[in-house]
Amino acid sequence: MCMFPRIIRNSFSSTRARDDARIAHRLNRELRGMDSRQGRFLPDRAYAGGINLAPGLYSITINFFNGAHLIHSERHENVRVQAGALNLVTSYFF
């Protein structure tokens, strides 16, 4: 159970230095017990881009680079672009 509101509310009850030390100690104790596993699985980087195209049928290639080095390439054939619609192509590489 997280007690941050109580910690902050109680921070004005006694001398400032003693309260600050108590807050730091309690926050440290609370944070050590938090479940932070999901943070290890989030991507290091995420990019989004967009281009304007006339409606039609397209073949596109998405390239992934590490600096100047091409590390992965993905080809999408027959991508239909429609006016007034969400035209979205997703791609990812681990």
Image (cartoon, rainbow, N blue to C red):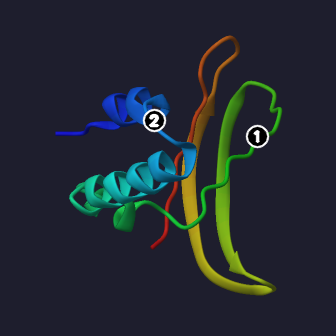
In the picture provided, is 83 more to the left or to the right than 10? right
Nearest the viewer among 60 and 48 is 48
Q: Amino acid at mark 2?
A: Ser
Q: Which mark is residue 7?
A: none
Q: Residues within 10 Å of mark 1 (few under 14, many from 20)?
A: few
At a point 70% along the width and 77% down the height, the residue shown is 65
Q: SS for tag 2?
A: helix
68 w.r.t. 9: above or below: below
Q: Quadrant of the C terminus?
A: bottom left
Q: Are marks 1 and 2 in contact (CB under 8 Å)?
A: no
**Residue 23, percent across and down?**
42, 48
58 w.r.t. 39: above or below: above
At a point 58% along the width and 35% down the height, the residue shown is 88
Circle 2 sits on which residue? Answer: 11
**Residue 68, percent across and down?**
81, 86
12 w.r.t. 76: above or below: above
Residue reaching furthest to the top: 84
Classify residue 53 by image quadrant: top right
Nearest the viewer among 75 and 49 is 49
**Residue 77, percent across and down?**
55, 52
Q: SS for tag 1?
A: loop
Circle 1 sits on which residue? Answer: 50
